Each structure stands twice: as C-alpha cells, then as structure tokens.
Amino acid sequence: MKSLAKTLQTACVCALALTAPAFAADEYNVSSGLTASGAPLGLHGIDPVAFLSLGNRFDGAASFAADHDGVAYYFASAANRNAFEADPSAFLPQNGGFCTFGVSKGKKFDGDPKFAAIVDGKLYVFLNEAVMRLFQKEQAGVIADAAANWPDIRSVPATEL
C-alpha cells in the first residue's frame, strides 16, 4: 500500500511539474528542458536587465534566477535579479520572447537574443540576422503589426499557427 501511495504521489508531482511549463511554452519562447525551479528558461539564459540597461548580451547564472509567469530568467547579478523582480514588465522581451517579425506575420518563431533590437526601451528578438534586417527596414510597421497580432496568438501553440 505504501508503494502505491508513493507511486501516486510521484505521478502527481510530475504532472504538476509539467503543467506550468506547458502553459508557459505557449505564451513564452523558452529553451527546452527545465531549470532547477522546474520552469523552462526564457531568453536563452541571457540577462534581460543587463541587456536593456547596457545594450549588450550578458549570460545570466542559475544562482541569480527568478521565475515570472512560469518562466525562469537568469541574471548576471543579484542586483539585476532584484530589479527584474521589482518590475518584470520593464525587462521582459516583447511578444513573449518570440521573433517579433514572425509575430507580425501571425507566427511564433524562436527569438534568439543574438539578433535583437532595443526600441523605445523595449527588447525585441528575432529568428536570425536576415529576419532582423527585414525588421530594420520597416521597424515601426513590424512593431505595430506584432502588437496587433500578439493578443490573438499569445496562447496559441506555435504548431497551430
């Protein structure tokens, strides 16, 4: 009987652990696998506070992690983590971290922070360099189209778009 109870308990814990990341994966671009907190990793582990504050990519560390809305973000320092926790919306990548150009077309593609732009204090990420160059040619229109599309596709799995 103890063995059955233990098995059921383990199954419940596993099911709960998988529930939040599955939901987050629909609305946020996350890396595969889970962090120590059980949440998937956002922004490829790049520190969003350092990125927006300094305009450059810095790898975050698991020792300075914070979870927001079912997604874990890594930071380069405790100060950056604390700034994020005080106002996550100021630092989150736009469109859930998906490629902004893709979202402008109604799709969810990986947003790679190697290809990113900061516009009016907001972080936009792109699939690759070629897509980022397309964004640069029609920046205002892409941002506007992505903002219009995002509410409709936010909770839709990428495979269904």
Image (tube, helix red, strand yellow):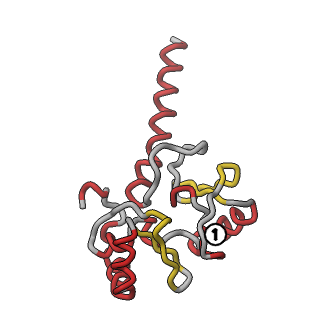
Q: Nearer the viewer, residue 147 or 131?
A: 131
Residue at point 41%, 60% (across, down):
27
Instruction: Give whichever of 41, 13 is nearer the camera.
Output: 41
Residue 16 in sight here:
yes
Q: Residue furthest right?
A: 79
Image quarter of residue 92: bottom right
In this view, the residue in front, 147 or 132, is 132
Q: Is residue 30 left or right of residue 135?
A: right
Quadrant in the rendering for residue 24: bottom left
Q: Is residue 153 left or right of residue 86?
A: left
- 138 or 95: nearer the viewer: 138
Residue 68 screen position, x and y as percent: 57, 59
- List the residue tagged with mark 1: 49
Give the quarter of the image for residue 147: bottom left
Q: Viewed as shown, does residue 134 lie left or right of 31?
A: left
Residue at the (51%, 19%) spot, across then down: 5
Q: Residue at x 41, y 48 (%)?
A: 22
| Marker count (numbered) | 1
Q: Residue furthest top?
A: 1
**Position of 12 relative to 36 (above/below):** above
Residue 150 visible, this orientation: no
Quarter of the image containing the C terminus? bottom left
Give the structural element (helix, strand or loop) at label 1.
helix
- Residue 7: x, y in percent? 49, 20
Q: Position of residue 140 (x, y in %)?
A: 38, 88
Dot 1 alpha-carbon crowd within 10 angstroms: few under 14, some 14 to 19, many 20 or more: many
Residue in view at x 50 percent, y 69 percent: 93
* Residue 81 % position (x, y): 69, 62
At label 1, the amino acid type is Val
